[in-house]
Image (tube, rainbow, N blue to C red):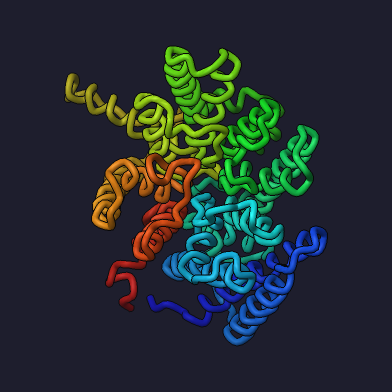
Amino acid sequence: MYLNYKRILSFLGLILVIAGLAMFIPIIWSLCYGDTDWSAFLVSGLLTTGIGLFIYRLNKTEGNLHSREALVIVTFGWILASVFGSLPYMLSGAFPTFTDAFFETMSGFTTTGASVASSVEDLPHGVLFWRSLTHWLGGMGIVVLLIAILNSVGVGGLQMFRAESTGPAAEKIKPRISETAKILWLTYLIFTVAGALLLWLSGMSLFDAICHSFGSVATGGFSTKNISIGYYNSPLIYWVITILCFLSGVNFSLYYQALKGKTLKTFWRNEEFRLYVFIVVFATVVIGLDLWQGGWGSITEIITASSFQVVTIITTTGYSTTDFNTWSPLAQWMLFLLMFVGGCAGSTGGSIKVGRILIMLKQGVLEIRRFIHPKQILNLRINNRLVPSEIVSNTLQFFVIYIFVAVVATLIMTALGLDLVSAASSVAAALGNIGPGLGLVGPMSNYGFLPDLGKYLLAFLMLLGRLELYTVMALLARSFWKE
């Protein structure tokens, strides 16, 4: 089976059109605040949209996509979006070098939230809005948005959906994949609007409320303030964002199922959701008790701070209200472990995912039982459904590859001059799409000091983590490109 490059290029052109049209939106905020960066977005939008349309029209062709073509489209679609998405940063002078602009854009689209900006508050409003908008577009997925817009994408639509979706197995809500994509994006939009409204009513400006709603629902983490959410010094805002991030870390298909079944029991019947809640509560209690023992603050402040930080880290949002670099080793270690958990499958969160953690835990218990009762027939079940052996195998392999990549990348970062804590947490934060790490890359720091090689490595890890390893790594195999 050969790759139809014309068909691939036509879809890549459409992805560029979406990215280009999105660049016109920040112009509104630039003009409202009297900033001069509007021209950078106008030129970037026209250039990106024009090139996208040219590529699409030149290569428009009929026929269904094959699975390999879908993988190429998804991977190169994200890379192209990040390359062209860097144009407004460079033309406005916000990030004059391509390396910094590309890092910031890839961090945005992959909802990582790691920044090279030394002072976010000095950036013009158009640039600030574009940073948050890239979060929002990447949270549910650029390709999923494309599928939602197109009425029919054929068999390849499902392949692209699976390549970009998160978790052990992508769930279809409706028989047609385009209908599934529309429902997911509609749910996503409702959460975003509700979040922006609540943050605005809680005391944020309308601009900040929209930007932080984008970052919360997409579990991204870009803020318009240098010290992140701690700038507002408002427990109400802290709790609104905590709840938004928590809800965004849940499998989005559960919301549709709960609405369709008209019962909230849908959530508690789901084993992954129950484990997600348990991990959040357990980590919050451990960190809360540790802060209380250290006399960190009042009980109310401790509950608010520990809940906020646990939720924003496990959902891979990465917002902060305080410098957790100053917390005890126990609290920091707990947050570091949460970086390898992530949200639920089918959520906007990154990292390994609670669903995979659940499969590995239950499989571990089964192996122990098989050792005790070797003749007993035991099958792995989740939510009373049999889990296929290939899903179990895929999950275990994913975990091994994930840890292997993290270890190798950490070695490279230490070779570039970072201490072990900073190197390991920067890799975990990039691969898990979290943003802030520990040490030199803590919540009150940035990634601007890294050498270019370090920035490109972390940008690659962001893409690898967002597309969940296999989508990108398949393209690195020589056999993939053979006819």
Furthest residue toward right = 32
User: x, y percentage for residue 160?
Assistant: 51, 61
Please name whichever residue, 133 or 89, is drawn nearer the observer in this view of the structure: 89
Q: Is residue 1 left or right of residue 350?
A: left
Please name whichever residue, 219 or 468, is drawn nearer the observer in this view of the structure: 219
Give the residue drawn at x 59%, y 41%. Answer: 228
Taking 85 as reference, is 171 above or below it? above
Asked which quadrant contains residue 294, the reply is: top left
Furthest residue toward bottom = 58
Give the residue drawn at x 54%, y 51%. Answer: 111
User: x, y percentage for residue 165?
Assistant: 51, 51
User: x, y percentage for residue 8?
Assistant: 51, 75
Asked which quadrant contains residue 12, the reply is: bottom right
User: x, y percentage for residue 30?
Assistant: 76, 63
Please indicate, yes or no, whether residue 178 appears anywhere in the rendered image.
no
Give the residue drawn at x 52%, y 31%. Answer: 309
Q: Quadrant of the N terminus?
A: bottom left
Taking 112 as reference, is 152 above or below it? below
Taking 294 as reference, is 212 above or below it? below
Taking 357 as reference, is 139 above or below it? below
Q: Quadrant of the C terminus?
A: bottom left
Please indicate, yes or no, whether residue 45 appears anywhere in the rendered image.
yes
Give the residue drawn at x 51%, y 53%. Answer: 115
Please name whichever residue, 303 or 328, is drawn nearer the observer in this view of the structure: 328
Please name whichever residue, 101 or 265, is drawn nearer the observer in this view of the structure: 101
